[in-house]
Every structure is written in structure tokens, then in C-alpha cells.
Amino acid sequence: MSNNPILCEPPVLVGSGILPDLNSTEDDIISRNFQADAVLHYATSRVTPQQTMDEIKVSFDILKSLTPCNFLVFGLGHDSFMWSSINPRGTTLFLEEDPKWVKAILRHLPFLRANNVNYRTKLYEAEKLIEHYYKEPDCWARKSFLRGNHKCMLALDMLTDELYDKEWDVIMIDGPKGYFDKAPGRMSAIYSAAVMARNRKGSGVTNVLLHDVDRDVEKVYAEVFLCRKNLVKGVGRLWHFQIPPASHVNSDFC
Ligand SMILES: C[S@@+](CC[C@H](N)C(=O)[O-])C[C@H]1O[C@@H](n2cnc3c(N)ncnc32)[C@H](O)[C@@H]1O
């Protein structure tokens, strides 16, 4: 519907993985329109995402090289439409703790896919939950399961089947809230992302992006579950991990 040549001319970035080639199928057209809508949305919005340009660029480059892919995002925000539009033909799913916030975002952006999650943790329990992890066999790496794992308080045990059955190529952890004592904290998100990555059956690694690593909980949980040896990049307050599937001999997270 636009007269803008940038939006209407055949794209020049063919092969970038983002823009379609000249033999447009219906899918290509839908993707292109979705991306044009995202451009319009952000060009006319006064609200900017919280991650910096340099941080966003890390995830942007990964998504560009993998799209269409399965992209799971912890935390729904003003950046959500951007993430979805970079992966127009893939699956992008957001997990959000606050049902009111889900409603508020989906009222304006109803095409985003977001699930509400009830976290069983509070930030002030972060230290105690590391002890719980060492003591509770159902938390241990050699078991590595989430669905129905009620005993391990770090496991997200009540997600939808889609969450457990899909292999997530990219997992971004930018939620839930972790900046006050009674907030859920990111402990379960980090633990569950590590379990999902370990259980990958397909080829390749799982890319895990963790934001707010200037905070102690994010740093400690990343060291314990995502592992320094898997850390490939750090930009600003963002760490990028590439986690290989677990081998039979490796029974620890790190
Ligand atoms: C650190 S924020 C993620 C923000 C996102 N990366 C962005 O750039 O907008 C994580 C959580 O904060 C909450 N949140 C973020 N913005 C909010 C707002 N404007 N109002 C209410 N809750 C918000 C949501 O629960 C979200 O999952």
C-alpha cells in the first residue's frame, strides 16, 4: 500500500536471509509486508528498546544468519516486534511473567506470539536455589528435563508442549524482571535455557543471549549453567553463548 520506493521496489539484499528474491511467493509477500510494518512502527514510535544498538546488533547478526529459525525470547517489551520481524518466516515466541503487560502489548501488536509464565522463584532466593540445585537430583545435568519437573524449583515445569517439543535455535534472556527482591529473577530462565540447549537433537549449537550481565545473579547463573567455555562474545551488558548438545560423557552443565 506504500508509495515509498524503499518498501515497494524489489529488495537488493537478496541472499541476506532477510529479504526475499524476485520470485515472490505469497509467503515472501507476507514476510515483506511484516517487515515494512515493523519499519513503520519503529519510525513512528517514541519508545526505544532498552538494549543498546551494539547489543542489539549481536542478536540481529545471529538471527540474520539463521532465519527462518526457532527463536525463544524471555521477556516481552518494546523490542518484541523488531525481533519477530527479523525472523518473519520462523517461529518467534515470547515468554512473559506479567499477564497485564502481555495484554497491553498484544492490544497494539496482536500478531506477536506470547505465552504467560508463572515463575516459582523470587530473586532473593537466588543463592538458596544454587544450593537446591546441588542437592536435588532432578536438577542435575545428567537428568536434564523440564516438563513435569516439579521437584527442581529452577525448572520451568508448566510450559506448553510446543515449548518443550521445539528445538530452539536462538534463546534470548531479557526477562523476567530481576532488579528487586520479590521479582522472579532470571534463575529459572537461565537454567531452563541451559537444559533446552543440552537436549538439542538436531545439528548445530543453541545460541543463548543473556542480557543484564552486570548483575550478580545473571553472572553467577551464567557461570554455573551456560558455562564460560561456551561464551563466544560479550558486548555491553550482553553475553552470547553457543551451547552444544550434551554428550553422553558430559554429565555436568560445565
Ligand atoms: C528488562 S525488560 C525487557 C525489555 C525489553 N528488552 C525492551 O527493550 O523493551 C523485562 C521485563 O520488564 C517488564 N517490562 C518491560 N517494560 C515494561 C513496561 N513498559 N511496563 C511494564 N512492564 C515492563 C516485562 O515484564 C519484561 O518481561
Image: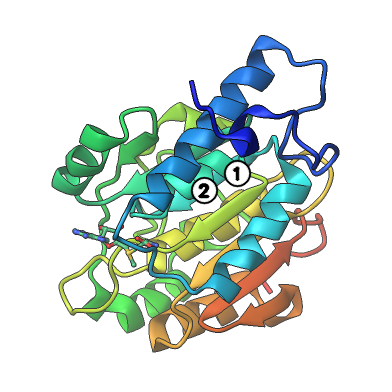
Residue 16 spot, x, y in % from top left: 80, 44
Please tell me whether mark 1 sits on a helix, a strand or a loop. helix
* Rendered residue at 40%/39% (across/down): 148
Please tell me whether mark 2 sits on a helix, a strand or a loop. helix
Residue 199 spot, x, y in % from top left: 67, 47
Question: Residue 83 — which label?
Answer: 2
The residues bearing labels 2 and 1 have C-alpha atoms spaced at a distance of 5 Å
Q: How does the figure colour the protein chain or chains?
A: rainbow
Question: Residue 217 — which label?
Answer: none
* Rendered residue at 77%/65% (across/down): 250
- Examine the rendering and report whether any part of residue 40 can be seen: yes
Quadrant of residue 110 within the rendered picture: top left
**Callout 1 environment at 10 Å: few (<14), some (14 to 19), or many (20+)?**
many
The quarter of the rendering in which ligand 1 is drawn is bottom left
Quadrant assignment for the C terminus: bottom right
- Left or right: residue 232 versus residue 52 is right
**Which residue extends farthest top?**
26
Of residues 41 and 215, the one nearer the viewer is 41
**Callout 2 environment at 10 Å: few (<14), some (14 to 19), or many (20+)?**
many
Amino acid type, residue under disc 2 in the picture: Trp
Q: Compared with residue 170, is residue 88 higher up or lower down, i.e. above or below?
A: above
Q: Compared with residue 192, is residue 186 higher up or lower down, i.e. above or below?
A: below
- Left or right: residue 11 versus residue 131 is right
* Rendered residue at 43%/60% (across/down): 189
Of residues 1 and 111, the one nearer the viewer is 1
Residue 90 spot, x, y in % from top left: 62, 32
Q: In the rendered image, which residue does mark 1 sit on?
A: 86
Residue 144 spot, x, y in % from top left: 58, 52
Q: Compared with residue 214, is residue 177 higher up or lower down, i.e. above or below?
A: above
Amino acid type, residue under disc 1 in the picture: Ile
Asked whether disc 2 touches disc 1, contact meaning CB atoms under 8 Å apart, the reply is yes
